Amino acid sequence: SAKIKHGFVCENCGTIHAKWHGFCNQCRQANSLKEFTNVVSSGSSGGGGGAGARAVEGVGLADRATKAELKPQRLAEITASKNHLHWRLSLPGKTGSEIARVLGGGLVPGSLILVSGDPGVGKSTLLLQVFGADEAAPVLYISGEESVEQIGNRAERLKIESNEIFILSATDLDVVLTWIQEIVPRAVVLDSIQTVYLPDASGSAGSISQVRECTSALLRVAKKTNTAIFLIGHVTKSGEIAGPRTLEHMVDVCLHLEGDRLLSQRLLRSLKNRFGSTKEVGVFEMVDNGLRAVENPSLMFLSDRTGEDSNASATVGVALEGSRPLLVEIQALCSPATSLPSKRTFTGVDPSRFNLIVAVLLKQARLRLARQDIFVNVVGGFRLEEPATDIAVAVAIASSYIERPVPRDTVFVGELGLGGELRFVTQLERRLFEASKLGFKKCIVPQGAKGVKVDGMELILCSSLKDVLEKVF
Ligand code: TYD
Ligand code: MG
């Protein structure tokens, strides 16, 4: 086809534009268009050079799906054309990069992202804040819950100064869709999916049919305009996101913001992600002016350990949240049971893991726990989800039972087997490194850790629970 003699090429995705824009309307990267002259003549008769040439000619997503183009392509052609790559937008600020990490390394244009969470947990705050810091391209924030004045008040509190954020208070989705296509923003936030309705669909706003119809209309417009759309969804009393489960299937990414309303920390987890791992977790703290990314989450889950005689029966373990090691503190208390059966009260520990640990303490370490009430608590409301913290839980319980303090400079890493053996855990070095960074000097580790070296950290190799207890107490 035609030779292009002059134009603007996006350095990010290679799309060619006739005119200069502040951002590429294909991959949405800001300031990526560079002027060029005298380049490219593409394959003339279609076929062969197709895939590559198409990227160069900058045909939009919608155009690409014309009938003639709807034909199977060789996988090799697709991979060679780089069209399959998901361009990712960075998000501004520390809060933004924390979200970007949870999203799998940035925001994929054209993706539909559900952000769910209990009312009041901070969903609106988080999204307004992140996009309020984005000066690169227009962002549209639509609220069906608050008036523009209310959003204005919140924005003042969050100190948002961006000139590129547009606020719309609307519940009619037709109006919303029109504006998305009019502005073609870099990203859209819809707060919330339960407050909007399509006049043509049945039911009232928030009903299953409305939520489903609205979501599919938004999905189409996201793909058509290549705009990333965030849907905020409240969790209903029964714990389901936005009512119907179907919503989770329709969107590309499901994020869940969680945290105790009384505590300030918030965790942003990814429950589903078509573009990345669901392992990453974002850690934030709610402060006076919004959500602040926590750079050193480990500290958050440790109680003040400087006092000499604060709870001595507490251990520190290293959990992994996604790719990130987190130091967690486990407190235990054993006291003679006042009535039988004795009580087992624990928070933050998986019940079957807890029972296994107590059984191993009984059987292999010969602790007489049968007539003891046992209480275990993971500090900061953290939930232990992997067996790597088994030994930390076991030592905390043992410490309280035998009434000897746990050394304060020691961390505990290892999984307990049924025979009381201490088993190797994944990503050991990473965990040790984190502990060392936070000032711990010694670590109880499984035998398998032989040969591992971490600066400033003494590794105490142990083969079994009994071995650990002998070396610690
Ligand atoms: P909000 O974002 O409205 O929650 P959601 O959209 O999930 O319902 O957050 C509401 C809570 O956050 C409210 O209890 C007040 C608190 N908050 C702060 O602590 N600091 C702030 O800067 C803001 C804006 C809110
Ligand atoms: Mg809200």
Image: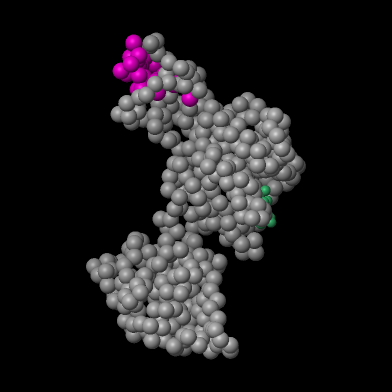
Residue 469 picture location, percent across and down: 36, 83
Which image quadrant for residue 453? bottom left
Please give the range of residues in magenta.
35-61
Residue 105 visible in the picture? no
In the image, residue 395 lies in the stretch drawn in magenta: no
Instruction: State left or right for residue 89 relative to residue 460.
Output: right
Residue occupying the point 48% across, 37% down: 108
Above or below: residue 412 compared with residue 23 = below
Please name the residue shown 55% across and 84% down the image: 341
Q: How is the image coloured?
A: one colour
Q: Residue 336: give x, y in percent of width and height.
A: 53, 89
Side of 189 relative to 362 (left or right): right
Percent position of residue 270, x then y = 50, 50
Q: Residue 44 colored magenta?
A: yes
Q: Along the line of sight, which residue is nearer the eye, 30 or 161?
A: 30
Residue 214 visible within the image:
yes
Looking at the image, which residue is at 35% across and 72% down? 417
> Considering the image in quadrants, where does the C terminus appear?
bottom left
Q: Position of residue 440 (x, y in %)?
A: 40, 72
Total count of labels: 0
Say which residue appears at 57% left-offset and 29% top-offset: 221
Q: Is residue 98 left or right of residue 192?
A: left
Quadrant where the N terminus lies?
top left
Q: Nearer the viewer, residue 285 or 85?
A: 85
